[in-house]
Amino acid sequence: MTKTSTPKLEIIYLDGGPETPKVPERIGPYSIKRRNPCFNHVLFGKHDSGLEVVIKGSKPYALEGMDPVTVGDMCLWYEYGVHSELDHPNIVPPVELLEHEGKHYLVVPEVGISDFCPELGYVKNLFDSEKLSLLRHIADALNYCHKNGVVHCDVKGSNMRIDKNKA
């Protein structure tokens, strides 16, 4: 019987250290309002035109033999390309893929008043029939993605935004 070794997991931090990266005041034409408290690489900002946006930075990923930052950028470019091809009323289109000071960012409009976590916030106070209606919107968008060869690999309430009875 051959013994195989367990691969080591390498933890890679944004900006090279375990501390939280500093939030820039601006990224291109966007002023930064705040960081998402759950995800260091997600920022909330405002375009010079007044458009409220979510700015997702590339996240380094460790793949053997490849630079983690390059892999993170490739993932973001791929996400932008796939996202740009989707045309559905319940899927928010991207605004742009932006490079700023050597880092890459995916920019999407900030939409909705809450995420879809039935036990929290706005959704908690809805009637069950309203929650089911929102779920139908989400299911319709996911079905559209699947019919177009796209699989959302991180389906969860915090990734679904609610905008007044529409998901």
Image (cartoon, rainbow, N blue to C red):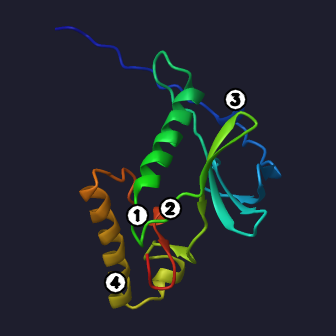
Q: Secondary structure at mark 4?
A: helix
Specify whether 105 is left or right of 91: right
Quarter of the view holding residue 49: bottom right
Which three-letter amino acid code belongs to the residue tagged 2?
Pro
Which three-letter amino acid code belongs to the residue tagged 4?
Ser
- Image quadrant in which the N terminus is located: top left
Contact between labelled residues 4 and 2, with CB atoms less than 8 Å apart: no
Q: CA distance from mark 3 to mark 1?
A: 37 Å
Quarter of the view holding residue 46: bottom right
Which is more toward the observer, 166 or 6?
166
Q: Secondary structure at mark 3?
A: helix
Give coordinates of residue 105: x percent, y percent.
Answer: 63, 46
Mark closest to the chain's N terminus, 2 or 4: 2
Contact between labelled residues 1 and 2, with CB atoms less than 8 Å apart: yes
Residue receiving disc 1: 87
Who's the residue at 56% across and 21% down the image?
67
Where is 123 relative to 52, above or below? below
Classify mark 4: residues with Cα within 10 Å, few (<14), some (14-19) or many (20+).
some
Which three-letter amino acid code belongs to the residue tagged 3?
Gly
- Of tags 2 and 3, which is closer to the observer? 2
Contact between labelled residues 4 and 3, with CB atoms less than 8 Å apart: no
Of all residues shown, which one is farthest toward the left? Answer: 1
Q: Which mark is residue 16?
A: 3
- Image quadrant in which the C terminus is located: bottom left
Where is 10 relative to 51, above or below? above
Q: Secondary structure at mark 1?
A: loop
Classify mark 1: residues with Cα within 10 Å, few (<14), some (14-19) or many (20+).
few
